Image (tube, helix red, strand yellow):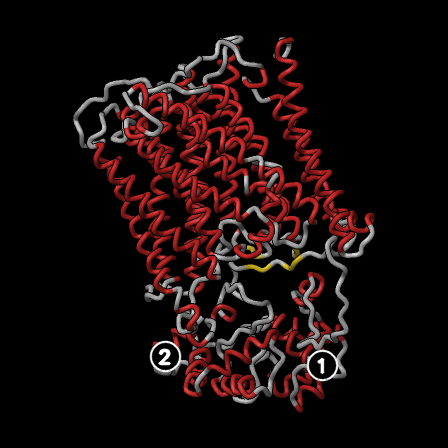
Amino acid sequence: MTHARNLTLAHLWIGFIAFAIALVLGVWQMWSRSPLPAPFLTASTYFSSVTAHGTAMAYVLTTFMIMGFGYYVAETSLARPLPAPRWAWIAFWLGVVGTVMAVITIFSGRAAVLFTFYPPLVGSVFYYLGVVLVVAASWIWCVLMIVAMGQWKRANPGRPVPLAMFATVANAVMWLWTTAGVAAELLFQVIPAALGLKAQIDVGLSRTLFSWTLHAIVYFWLIPAYIAFYTMVPQAAGGRLYSDTMGRLTFVLFLIYSLPVGIHHLLMDPEQSNAFKFLQVALTALVSVPTLLTVFTIGASLEIAGRLRGGRGLFGWIGALPWERPLMLATGLSFVMLGFGGFGGLINMSYGMNAMVHNTSWVTAHFHLIFGGTVVIMYFAIAYTIWPSLTGRAAPSLAAQRTQLWLWFVGMLVMTLPWHYLGLLGQWRRVATFNYADPIIAAWGPWVIVSLVGGVLLLVSGLYFVYNLLQFAVTREAHVPAVLYATAVHPPARVPAALNGFRLWNVLVAVLMVLAYGYPLAQFFVIDPPGALVHRVDQRR
Amino acid sequence: MDADPRDRPFRLWASVAILAVFAFSVLFGFVLLPIIQGRAAGIDAFTSICRALGLAPGSPAAPQPVSDAKAHPTTRVAWSAGLMDSLARPSAAGASLAGACAACHGKDGRSVDPKLYPDLAGQSAAAIYKQLSDFKSGSRKNAVMTALAQPLTEEQVVALAAHFASFPVRPLPPAQVAAPAAAIERLVARGDPARAIAACNACHGDRSGGPVEAPRLSRQSTQYLAAQLRAFKAGERRNDIYSRMQSVAAALEDSEIDGLAAYYSNEPL
């Protein structure tokens, strides 16, 4: 590693500091919603806290984690220095400045608009500019990743790009497409309103633009976990990747089917028509293809590892896997959470069932299980896996890492399973307090407290994670370099150009986006619907 | 880059597969499903396809329901960007009309008898406009104000609201009353979920996300605020959209009404 060592450490630390602060806020929010009296609770503190929690978790932790991990993958998988490291540092500082701007604005009580913005609510422009800076930083990262892959391909004509880098660039390309929606919403609608240049916002348009981003952003967060599944986990398990091509197809399918599907977040919205909702839900169903490809491929890779380690019989190979290794353990726990979360997701994308759960805690539980569970536990595992090579020190205690991962898993299930159930009972999301004197709502109380206990476990686990990373500074044992990326059972000597680059897929994404989002967006300009009055939350009335 | 002829079949079939799935979804969602749903609801195929696409209003699966219900609006005020814009601009017309108001509300919006007449100084133009419009339309009734408001034109209502909103709020009197009870502060900041009382400051606080017409309560007299809460409680005043204030006031104890009125009349800014 030439530049990545410091870059990755800096990015990951920023992400994890934001994560630790957001965890504390998250627990306080659950406490507020519970029957137990929470301190500092008013409607405005609650919604400021939710805004900070969402912004830190969804924009800061993820973006810094993905950027940092991307630099690491670029140098380690391509075995060459990162191009233009100066730009990487510029992007880092842009992101830091943006984060600080957003956080200060939120905590001064001028941006309680929640992290998905909810126009016509409009907060201080500094909040939105802060978020835009973080996104701009990630755009620089995207370009650097694409350039790094391009340089490698020119230096290695005809050879397949290493899968880890191919996937990282798939994520970068997807992210450029993804952010177009939210960038248009912020730059053309929300920020002009925040500056006082516009008195009205077409909320239908802004919700549609945000939906453009809203599904694919989750895959942006998810792909590092999938990179670990395909390229690191088979190695950690002591086996080989079952199929390199499956990996490429998976990442390509994520690129294609994470984008023209966002209207499934608008099933209960009146501004989009039934036919386009149907179309995008049908395309959403295809996201199950790369997910099942992954479950199958990683399952097969692990079976190879288990049998190489002496596992016998139909299921004996599972027990033979090296579960004492944190990356292996995290993968198992992540798959269990992916299972629960995935089934919940199928319910969310089904129109009739969505109508039942749409504005309830079910949805909050779902995205915490999928993101906080499946994805973040892999962020932990990735950090544990790459930290020795970043710091040059061996892991102080694998047992401590395993305990932390188990705590996270148990906490996440204890928090989200009752939360799903509360959603089915009708508990609203985006609400600060409940009337527990109402006999129906009183019956929710015990389950809310159970989920709060889960939240506390998550806080303990999150802080334990940071502690475990800090322990690397204390240990003296030097890190012994080891192979990080798995070899495929049949390492590809040559892959079709389409699976070694993104030109074809960009064309297909463009076609699908025009067809799936063309009229749903154009209608707002054809019909010219009335706008909603801007409602400021950052000024004295 | 894509010159290798071995790659052509992959590229072709990948594109065909992706576009075929798309075409199937379009055929099913845009054509077949609306026709089948429309047939069951007695809607012709063309109309139901147009409805499914959003080109015509209504559902492709159900005939449009007919309703004879007559609307009884709580208020006739409808906010628009144009209205908000004119409310932000005090004009000479407002100043020349204000003479009639000054007898009670004061020349600079500071009431001559705050116990009976509210201060208009420091109030938002939207709040003044809402109340004056409601007096004019009959949504809110008051012997004096109804008679004064009815002859006003819409432009005059706007001009008056913008005029009085331009004066600064009354300073806090130097003689301070005792600090408010914790229970009152709690109602202001958190409400009481057990009685379905929202926090007062959810709408009346600074930087709240509440409706634009929610008035600023600070520095109005204790007597005036308490009288309004009691009018809401008794159902004598009912120009609040969704009966928000009527339902809150109905749940308040008398002592709380007085406590809240005292709290806001002495609220530091």
- Chain under label 2? B
Q: Nearer the viewer, residue A294 or A272?
A: A294
Compared across the picture, whether B31 is left or right of B142 comes to right
Question: Where residue A117 sits: x, y (%)?
Answer: 54, 51
In the picture, the disc for residue B180 is: 2
Callout 1, which amino acid? Lys
User: Which residue shows up at 56% across the image and 59% down it?
Assistant: A536
Q: Residue furthest front?
A: A313
User: Which residue shows up at 35% across the image and 79% down it?
Assistant: B181
How packed mark 2 is, by other alpha carbons closer than 10 Å (few <14, some 14-19, many 20 or more), is some
Compared across the picture, whether A432 is left or right of B152 comes to left
Q: Which element type, helix, strand or loop, lies under badge 2?
A: loop
Q: Residue furthest bottom?
A: B143
Question: Where residue B116 sits: x, y (%)?
Answer: 55, 89
Viewer can see residue B114 = no
- Residue at numbered disc 1: B136
User: Which residue shows up at 38% across the image and 73% down it?
Assistant: B186
Task: Decide: is A70 above or below A350.
Answer: above
Give the quarter of the image for residue A77.
top left
Residue contact between numbered discs 2 and 1, judged by CB atoms under 8 Å: no
Cα separation between marks 2 and 1: 37 Å
Q: Nearer the viewer, residue A427 or B267?
A: A427
Looking at marks 2 and 1 on the same chain, the residue that comes earlier in the sequence is marked by: 1
How packed mark 1 is, by other alpha carbons closer than 10 Å (few <14, some 14-19, many 20 or more), is many
Quarter of the picture holding the C terminus of chain B: bottom left
Q: Nearer the viewer, residue B204 or B58?
A: B58
Question: Where residue A160 sits: x, y (%)?
Answer: 50, 13
Q: Nearer the viewer, residue A292 or A446?
A: A292
Quarter of the picture holding the N terminus of chain B: top right
Question: Where residue A247 sits: x, y (%)?
Answer: 48, 23
Same subunit, labels 2 and 1: the answer reads yes
